[in-house]
Image (cartoon, grey):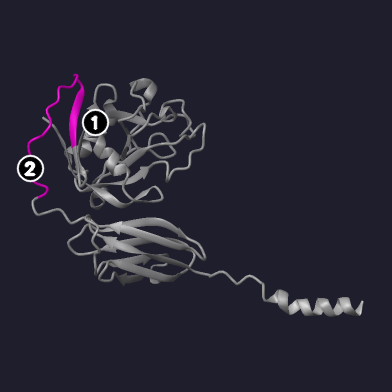
Amino acid sequence: MSHILRVALLLVPVLGLQQATTPPATAELTGRVIDRDGGGLPDVIVTLEALPPAANRSIVTGSDGTYRFGKVGPGTYTVRFDLKGFMPYSRARLPFTAGQTRVMTVSLEAEPPAGADGPRPAPDLKVDLPEGEVAVGIETSLGSFYIAVDTRRAPVTASNFLKYVDAGLYDWGRFHRATRPDNYTPSPPNRPMMNIIQGGINPAKRSEGFPAIPLERTNVTGITHVTGVVSMARGTSADTATSDFFILLDDQPSLDYGGLRFDDGQGGGAFGRVLSGLDVVKKIQQQPVDGQNLSAPVTIRRVWRLN
């Protein structure tokens, strides 16, 4: 018995050396700010915003565009990027947990040149559409594409979209979301894999937006969610679409009336289709992402009706 006791006592300090170390109580945010060509942007003011505002922290990127926040307390934050001559960018509702290291590389777009809100240039695509369809051009920082807006079958949704177009609110907006196999976790049968891009109006003009519209269901319009279809983004309630829209890169019957991608089974409000430039849509979808958010939102330089 005495030999057993001595062995047990000798094991105590040895086992103590194998105890797990305490994980860090804080998180870290690091990354790089670049321009559209991939070059590092120095002197960008990066602000980590928390509640209360007194807890906000700001740093400036180095000569290669890099930045780092250490000792970030667990919580939810907004990160802002500001540089004179460039459009500001922010990411809201970012969760940080103890021990986490989040890497965020973003690209800033140069501010619109003087006179960018002036008369639009002549359309560069000639189309012959059925009565009730309106051709719209969408120029982005990665190229242009063209859609047909169906005012006959989806009059409420189409009129709402064209109202934003005519008011110039999509000019200097951005495509900010993309889903694809490497960043979307399907949950069949109701939420299968989905390939889309989503965009919206100029963030600086959000206060000029219009009220939400009633949902025009696909069983009424007959416009179903197939590859190339343009549809309005909505919330958990049906009648909540305002200005954000998305473009499908695969067939999604789960978004039609009766499909259960939305729990209420009401589906989305499809209202148009891509006429030309689907390759540009695919190029936008393949840009770097942080989750489902485009790390560098793709600027919508202008949106206009083709006469």
| Left or right placement of residue 204 versus residue 119 in this view | right
Lower position in the chain sequence, tag 1 or tag 2: 2
Residue position marked by numbered label 2 in the rendering: 119
Quarter of the picture containing the N terminus is bottom right
Residue position marked by numbered label 1 in the rendering: 159
Residue that protrudes farthest toward the front in the picture: 3
Residue 205 x, y percent position in the rendering: 23, 49
Residue 297 x, y percent position in the rendering: 28, 50
232 is higher (above) or lower (below) than 172: above
Which secondary structure lies at badge 1? helix
Q: Does the segment drawn in magenta span residue 226?
A: no
Q: Residues within 10 Å of mark 1 (few under 14, many from 20)?
A: some
How far is disc 1 from disc 2 in space, using C-alphas? 22 Å
- For the magenta stretch, what is the residue range? 116-137
Q: Residue at x 14, y 25 (%)?
A: 127
Q: Amino acid at mark 1?
A: Ser
Name the foreground residue: 250 vs 78: 250
Dominant secondary structure (helix, strand or loop) of the stretch shown in magenta: loop
Q: Amino acid at mark 2?
A: Pro
Which secondary structure lies at badge 2? loop
- Residue 56, can we see it? no
